[in-house]
Amino acid sequence: MIIKVTVIVHSDNDELQLGVDESYSLLVSKSNEHSIIGELSIEANSIYGALRGLETMSQLCIFDYGVKTVQIHKAPWFIQDKPRFAYRGLLLDTSRHYLPIEIIKQIVESMSYAKLNVLHWHIIDEESFPLEVPSYPNLWKGAYTKWERYTVEDAIEIVDFAKMRGINVMAEVDVPGHAESWGTGYPDLWPSPSCKEPLDVSKNYTFDVISGILADMRKIFPFELFHLGGDEVNTSCWATTPHVKQWLKDHNMTSKDAYQYFVLRAQEIAISQNWTPVNWEETFNNFPSKLNPQTVVHNWLGGGVCPKAVASGFRCIYSNQGFWYLDHLDVPWDKVYYAEPLEGIKSISEQKLVLGGEVCMWGETADASDVQQTIWPRAAAAAERLWSDKETTSSTNTTTAALQRLEYFRCLLTMRGVPAAPVTNFYARRPPLGPGSCYEQ
Amino acid sequence: MVMRKLGLRSILFAVVIHILVISAVADIKNLKIWPMPLSVSYGHRILQLSNEFVLKTEGSKYPDASGILKEGFSRLLDVIKVAHVVDANFSYEGPSPVLKGIQVVILSPSDELQYGVDESYNLTIPEKGNPAYAFLTAKTVYGALHGLQTFSQACHFNFTTRTIEVHQVPWTIVDRPRFSYRGLLIDTSRHYLPLPVILKVIDSMAYAKLNVLHWHIVDTQSFPLEIPSYPKLWNGAYSSSERYTVADAAEIVRYAGRRGINVLAELDVPGHAKSWGIGYPSLWPSKDCQEPLDVSNDFTFKVIDGILSDFSKIFKYKFVHLGGDEVDTSCWTLTPRINKWLKQHRLYGTTAYEYFVLRAQKIAISHGYEIINWEETFNSFGNKLSPKTIIHNWLGGGVAQQVTAAGLRCIVSNQDKWYLDHIDTTWEDFYSNEPLTNITNPEQQRLVIGGEVCMWGEHIDGSNIETTIWPRAAAAAERLWTAYDNIAKNPSQAARRLAHFRCLLNQRGVASGPLTGGGRAAPEEPGSCYEQ
């Protein structure tokens, strides 16, 4: 019988930053002839390592239907564990569909079950601007409705809730594209009322607003990384809107130059506010030598990007859309599982520049009703890739074992009330094909 | 003189009723309450909900020893604060008066939850007062819980003050359900549903004022429930961890009961029972012909007796569901041993089916239950059924008419409109399904005790049950709760209000799907919850 858990945490610092020590060791001793009391102890350098240990411990516990108590089988256990990558992310998109706070909390809670540690909050996009920005109080007029908004306190609540589970929140302000909704409150940010994206590069006002948003967000999001987007910028509105066109001419810039100018100026704002900028890979693909050397490049378009980014000395986050975009419903669990963030990177020093990876739950067809069954169980496959040692997860003969464990984990999620979909359906988030056991679907 | 006074009073009363009904009909567009109450009048002012919003029970005859009301009040505070962070330090000095609390007066001291329990309530929220209190009266605590649900839907978060407001005061709401049986079926045999999933479904039922969880526990595919009298029955579970202990089942009943929801347990015999034989193979006609249960074996009825005896300790609702649907008796005639028995007893397939159902009914009655059976029993031998039997319609329309004409009670679940697993059926279909169709005689109308939406589990598990149930079950919930005259004649008139309720469910963490499309459809494109 186990009557207590001893948790030893060596550091009294509970600051949660990138690279915080998440290692732990877990010991379950067997009861012996002297005592029927077994011992369970967790030792960690940081409180966040201890939380990971508690999660592992919960997965050793099994309800025994005979004696109707919770048991730990196969004792004694000794587990030593630490993550392979420091950054293990999940993106949520609250612009395409507003996600209520309660739903976001449910997702954060479930992330901790899979030891994911970064919630990448893609707050705003062209469709809606749901977050309150006190410096520019008209911005959230770009919300879908007055009910579909987050106050500053709501955002802080999410950050605090996540921190209690060892999860950082990385906010994203995606500029200059994907920002049409900003202009609902401040139409001056549009090149013109008929050509609304990207943000008007020619006005200082645009950068004042960005600076105001980032200053307000700095008070909410303590994580050192901040995502500035920079993807899919179609500059044709700049080239066709007379006053912007004139400005380009005056500054002797092509549209492409202006894109670079915009991204770099936004980076400067972020750095001046003590953020480390993260940018989608297009920024690196277009002007790699100009990016601030601190920049973290966020891959998404395809393979081979992180190798180039780290070869240029940048840090990189892997999210190859062929494998790790959860809105791609036709990517099966094993494709997710075998995607390798370090693929094509041989040198150890370059490998160290890959912070980790992230699965992306873009919200075009995901709202409160289906977001969790689209995330799970595939996000758990990526979570193992990001947490576990490469040797234990990479040979193809691990497939059967991994599938069995993943099916078990998805049932564990449903037992905890998380709507995780069947593992082996051809399309994600589809219903089970017929009656059957959770463990076989 | 006396007569004249009375006359005047009743005229006045009639006028008041008239005004109330008019306001309910005329202002429906601006109401955000689901399901629509019996009568509503409201104003256009706003009250600020106090940060120390309190429950007062002076004058209540209900002692609340079990804490049902207190817990209901605490859940009320939870759901009205769930959507956003409320500023706890906000000191209010604005123009709107503060609502200090709610006074709940309950007339009955009893918290017994039985079929037909009085669920009515009156809720008034004043526009001012010093201090102002909402006033909720009800015959029973369960009526009061409904009143608290309605109250929660009058509360809104103010994005400027970061506090909760009650909009559209003053409110006067008089409310009671149209039908006393408003059910939702869940099926834990086709897929096991984990305990937290079931509890969450119960929470969401309470939001829509549904009051019966019909638990279709066992079927052909698996037998997940522990039966102490026959401990091998749950060997028929899918796996060792996909099972419910007696304590689990008791917890479901307790949890539902505290929300005013009864649990109707179903034991579907003699068909749909193949999984019983995993633990006790002699219940099968033979190893290769495993359904229906062996009618010729007394052991079969001993097991049923044992199960129902165990049921009676857990499931306190006065009804038990004995199934009786889709019985294919060919295994009986094909199995020589049983065929011989049939001949000895001058029975054939259909009469043996009747014999089985009636014998099972007697066993259930001996354990104090009244019986619900699927409609095939009525269609095949209606005049032989215990007269207290309630017939559960499912095959199609028009059955309630025949059942009530025969003097039996009926629950409506016609599959073309109220089967949630039919994912092509739209919310409008659910909304429009009228249980009293073609039943004009008031005596017969009273025999229709209500209706139920059925969430059969062939393609339903913990991952998609909520989004397949909601929002369509809410459409049926309004049909079952709301007075006929207040139900939208054209569902489109209720669409905005239902969309609002769907988004309310989302805010409360319930995965209700969009209105567009049938069941569990993903939103087609980006957009507001209120428009999808």
Image (spheres, rainbow, N blue to C red):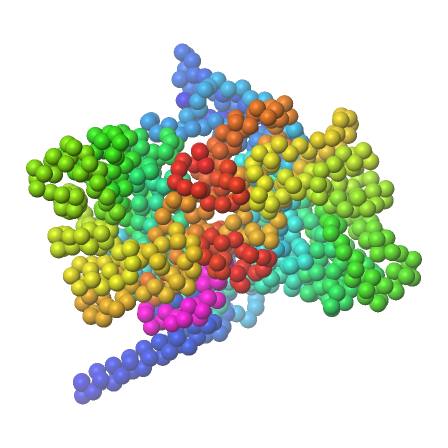
- Between A400 and A88, the one nearer to me in the picture: A400
Which percent across, then down, holds residue B381?
Answer: 15, 52
- Between A358 and B76, the one nearer to me in the picture: A358
Residue shown at 63% from the left, 23% from the top: A391
**Residue A372 highlighted magenta (yes or no):** no
A118 sits left or right of B339 in the view = right
Which quadrant would residue A334 be assigned to in this image? top right
- Between B107 and A134, the one nearer to me in the picture: A134
- Between B438 and A369, the one nearer to me in the picture: B438
Note whether residue B190 is visible: yes
Which quadrant would residue A340 be assigned to in this image? top right
B2 sits left or right of A301 in the view = left
* Residue B198 sits above or below residue B383 on the image: above
* Residue A250 sits above or below residue A6 on the image: below
What segment is highlighted magenta in the picture?
B483-504
Which percent across, then down, holds residue A294?
Answer: 80, 40
Which percent across, then down, holds residue A296?
Answer: 75, 40
How many discs appear?
0
**Residue B496 highlighted magenta (yes or no):** yes
B85 sits left or right of B110 in the view = right
Note whether residue A7 is visible: no
Q: Main secondary structure of the magenta part?
A: helix
Which percent across, then down, holds residue A36?
Answer: 40, 17
Residue shown at 36% from the left, 48% from the top: B456
Residue shown at 21% from the left, 34% from the top: B285
B101 sits left or right of A131 in the view = left
Q: Quadrant of the N terminus of chain B?
A: bottom left
